[in-house]
Image: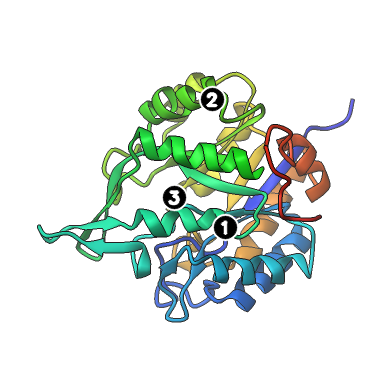
Amino acid sequence: MANQKIIVLVAPTGGMAFKSQNPRLPTQPEEIARDVYDCYNAGASVAAIHARLPNDEATCNAGIYRDINARIRSKCNIVINNSTGGGIHGDMIKPLEDGLFDTAWSERIKGMDAGAEMCTLDACTMNATFNAAEVLLNTPPSRCRQLAATMKERGIKPEWEVFNPAHIIQDVAHLIEQGFDQPPYIINMVLNAHRGFQNAMPYTPKTLQYMVDMLPQESMFCVSGIGPAQLPAGINALLLGGAMIRVGLEDNLYYRHGQLATNVELVERAVRLLREMDYDVATPAEARQLMGLPRSDSTVRPEFSV
């Protein structure tokens, strides 16, 4: 019997950290494309991309996303997943009258305009605290529905991003029941972000088991284990039946305590551990087959080619 194929997903940048925290963080299109290509050569088959402005702050600018995507596609056929969460600085936020900040909805939806095969769909509303600023990620049911409907129309596969059990049993399950996605349902559980994100959950094996038990049938899941939780949460997810492992500087800037990481190092370690556990590492073509790409329920043809 053939060994199980596991997808290695790399999240190289994110929408929070700066180069001052890790100089190896890629933020500009050529840096991101080069890093993703190196990670592809190391065994990654999916790349979760966040765009940045020239000053390294977060954006969902479609032109910048297109530039990144085109540079990556000129080098390899890795699956590209663009963010519609964006980040918590740059043109992604706007000040409110009470001194707090809100994420700019009009900017977030631009993440769907760059022809990616996949986009993150943050089916949640929460507050993030970063550098003493409190930023609201406001995604009520109507906005979740708009994201899901637009992705379906454009042939974009959603990666449902959830931070606690309520996000699974409310918005994700509800929208899936309404026909906005088809199996397999790609779900990323973000754990150990509770120090910076209100209503997020710490990582423990019991917490992960509880959330996995709530997932819709035919789900394909992984974990964004934040900080030191990245590796144990990723391996734990595999042992619970996940078919993906997620690594990258978006979630964890360190290889081990006190040692800053590179994306390639994190991918190489994940691949090494998968092989030691007798898993097979999926190629991008195998990842597309496992994840149901391209979507077959869209009303328009996707804009990408592989």
Q: Is residue 92 above or below residue 238?
A: below
- Residue 238 lies, in percent from the top left, at 63, 34
Q: Quadrant of residue 234?
A: top right
Per the image, the residue denoted by label 1 is 113
Q: Amino acid at mark 3?
A: Ile
Q: Between disc 1 and disc 2, whose residue precedes?
A: 1
The residue type indicated by label 2 comes to Ile
Q: Is residue 73 visible?
A: yes
Residue 91 left/right relative to 69: left
Dot 2 crowding, Cα within 10 Å, few <14, some 14–19, many 20+: some
Per the image, label 3 sits on a secondary structure element best described as loop
Which residue carries the number 3 mark?
226
- 188 lies left or right of 207: right
Q: Which residue is mark 2?
A: 176
- x and y percentages locating residue 135 in the rendered image: 26, 55
Q: Quadrant of the N terminus?
A: top right
Q: Is 64 in front, or is 154?
A: 154
What residue occupies the far right of the structure in this picture? 1
Q: Which residue reaches farthest front?
A: 299
Disc nearest the viewer among 1 and 2: 1
Q: Earlier in the sequence, mark 3 or mark 2?
A: 2
> Given the image, on which type of amino acid does mark 1 rest?
Asp
For the point 74% across and 40% down, the residue is 293
- Residue 298 falls in image quadrant: top right
| Element at label 2 | helix
Estimate the spatial distance between the alpha carbons at disc 3 and disc 2, rounded to whole Å. Answer: 27 Å
Instruction: Pick out the residue farthest to the bottom.
Output: 55
Residue 78 appears in which quarter of the rendering? bottom right
